[in-house]
Amino acid sequence: MLRRCTTTTTTYSIQRKVPQLRSIRHVAVVHASCSFNICPAVISSIAAFTSTYPLDTLKTRTQSENVPKSAHKALFQGYAAGVVLCLFSSLAYFSILFALSTCMYIAQASAAASFLSSFVKVPGKAITKLLQNGDFASAHDAAQYIHNNYGIGGFFRGFWPYVLDDIPEMAIKVCLFKYLEAWFGQNTGLIGALSGVLSSIVTQPLDLLQTRMMCNISKNPIDFAKLPYFSGLPLVLIINAVQSGVFLVTYRTIDALMLL
């Protein structure tokens, strides 16, 4: 009788440990898979960035208050610096996202990754937007001007508008992708375009505000009450639709090739 009870207790304790062992193994497998997928995600981000860079330059100049006349034709101005900054910012975002997605819901992981990677993204945005606006010819000149006139804090002008824009936009985009995928199946380009358009409508005013703050080198105070918050909206919708579509198509293609 005593032996049976002992055996039963031991068996029960082992059965309790099995799910724990399975969950630990599952987390390890998911983490390894996510780490493996960082490479196509970063490459896809660069492809999406490149595909819409001229349109993004036009959007910056549309939303900015002062644009030099000499800058209107150079649509790829600042691209070299922008693509390098895109590499580091996307690497930061997806590394954090894939690490946190093992222990959080995808929307929570996306929000946390957006916030933490903003410390890399915003300084890069501040430099790139000045180059797109035609204020400076090189990233070194733009960075030197920001540092000399505003200090380190100058690289984070427009930080909070950017964060409040990026967090809901990325969370909405990720969640919409999951829902739209159930409706449209594997039509990746269409799903990406719809997710990008719907998410950008919500955050458009903040997008304009961060552009004004980053491009305001004249140090004139910004009258927030009179800002045209929906200026450049058509360009924003096109950019987000194309970027999201290109990103998802490129990601799926590279991911499939890596599994061959």
Image (tube, helix red, strand yellow):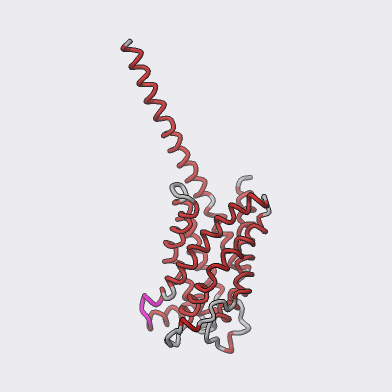
The answer to whether 222 appears left or right of 189 in the picture is left
Q: Which residues are magenta?
A: 150-154
Q: Residue furthest left?
A: 2
> Image quadrant for the C terminus?
top right
Q: Is residue 75 above or below residue 247?
A: below
For the point 44% across and 32% down, the residue is: 19
For the point 47% across and 46% down, the residue is: 31
The foreground one among 208 and 27 is 208
Q: Count of labels shown?
A: 0
Residue 163: x and y in percent read 45, 67
Whether residue 156 appears in magenta in the rendering, the answer is no
Q: Is residue 35 above or below residue 125?
A: above
Residue 130: x and y in percent read 50, 80
Residue 16: x and y in percent read 40, 29
Q: Is residue 217 above or below residue 12?
A: below
Q: Residue furthest top?
A: 1
Provide the major secondary structure of the magenta segment.
helix
Residue 144: x and y in percent read 42, 80
> Image quadrant for the N terminus?
top left
For the point 49% across and 44% down, the residue is: 30
Q: Residue furthest bottom?
A: 69
